[in-house]
């Protein structure tokens, strides 16, 4: 089921599902909202967020917890970017879509051995201050979904992860 307005927002989540258990990832869907994500800052390839957790007296959690999520995406080197820019510059279709603030569907072809979307755990370093040691916990997953939502309206942030 599609959850994003654009193919690039959906592709970001599908890329994550390629190496993360989709069930575990989907548990974070309800954590992508403004009600849960109290603060989100993105600086190049680094995203930091503060997430509102749940009160659960059964587990002894009587005060609303706040969790810190930290996500870093691998970067593409300057040389790899230069090669990709050369490829993009030679493709009029890609250029016209980029000028319209759209990401061409086959843009990964410009990156030869590299790519815009994460492909494995080696491409993402994520942590959360919550007691769930699995990765991603629902808080990290919620931030992934928020990133996908942001990409729907601001697709040029996708390359900025490099």
Image (tube, grey):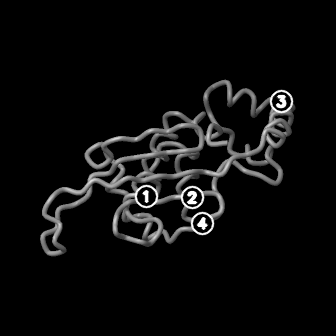
Instruction: Check the image and report above or below for 80 versus 98.
Output: below
- Judge the density around disc 2: few (<14), some (14-19), many (≥20) Cα neighbours within 10 Å: few
Check the image and report above or below for 25 versus 69. below
Among the two numbered marks 4 and 3 on one chain, the one whose residue lies closer to the N terminus: 4
Q: Which quadrant of the figure contains the C terminus?
A: top right
- Distance Cα–Cα, label 2 vs label 4: 16 Å
Q: Label 3 to label 2, Cα distance in Å?
A: 31 Å
Where disc 4 sits, the SS reads loop
- N-term mark: 2 or 4: 4
Q: Position of residue 17 (x, y in %)?
A: 54, 64
Which quadrant does the N terminus fall into? bottom left
Whether pointer 2 and pointer 1 mark residues with C-beta atoms closer than 8 Å, the reply is no
Left or right, 66 with reference to 100: left
Label 1 neighbour load within 10 Å: few <14, some 14-19, many 20+: many
The circle drawn on residue 89 is: 3
Q: In the picture, residue 83 is in which quadrant?
A: top right
Query: Which dot, 2 or 4, sits closer to the camera?
Result: 2
- The span from disc 1 to disc 4 (Cα, nearest Å) is 16 Å
Residue drawn at (40%, 41%), measured in percent from left and top?
40
Q: Provide residue 23's location: percent of width, then percent of height.
A: 43, 71
Task: Identify the residue at horizontal 77%, vertical 44% (top origin).
Answer: 77
From the viewer's perspective, is the residue at label 1 or at label 4 nearer? 1
- Identify residue for label 2: 125
Residues at marks 4 and 3, CA–CA distance in whole angstroms: 30 Å
Would you name the residue on which mark 1 appears? 140
Marks 4/3 in contact by CB < 8 Å: the verdict is: no
Task: Tell me the tag on residue 18.
Answer: 4
Q: Secondary structure at mark 1?
A: helix
């Amino acid at each position: 089921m599609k959850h994003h307005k654009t193919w690039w927002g959906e592709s970001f989540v599908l890329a994550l599902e390629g190496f993360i258990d989709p069930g575990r990832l989907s548990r974070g869907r309800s954590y992508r909202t403004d009600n849960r994500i109290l603060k989100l800052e993105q600086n190049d390839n680094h995203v930091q967020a503060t997430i509102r957790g749940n009160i659960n007296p059964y587990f002894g959690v009587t005060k609303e917890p706040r969790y810190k999520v930290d996500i870093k995406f691998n970067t593409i080197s300057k040389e790899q970017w230069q090669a990709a820019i050369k490829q993009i510059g030679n493709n009029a279709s890609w250029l016209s879509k980029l000028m319209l603030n759209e990401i061409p569907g086959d843009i990964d072809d410009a990156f030869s051995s590299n790519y815009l979307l994460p492909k494995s755990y080696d491409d993402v370093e994520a942590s959360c201050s919550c007691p769930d040691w699995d990765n991603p916990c629902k808080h990290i997953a919620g931030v992934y979904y928020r990133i996908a939502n942001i990409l729907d309206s601001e697709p040029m942030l996708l390359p900025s992860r490099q």
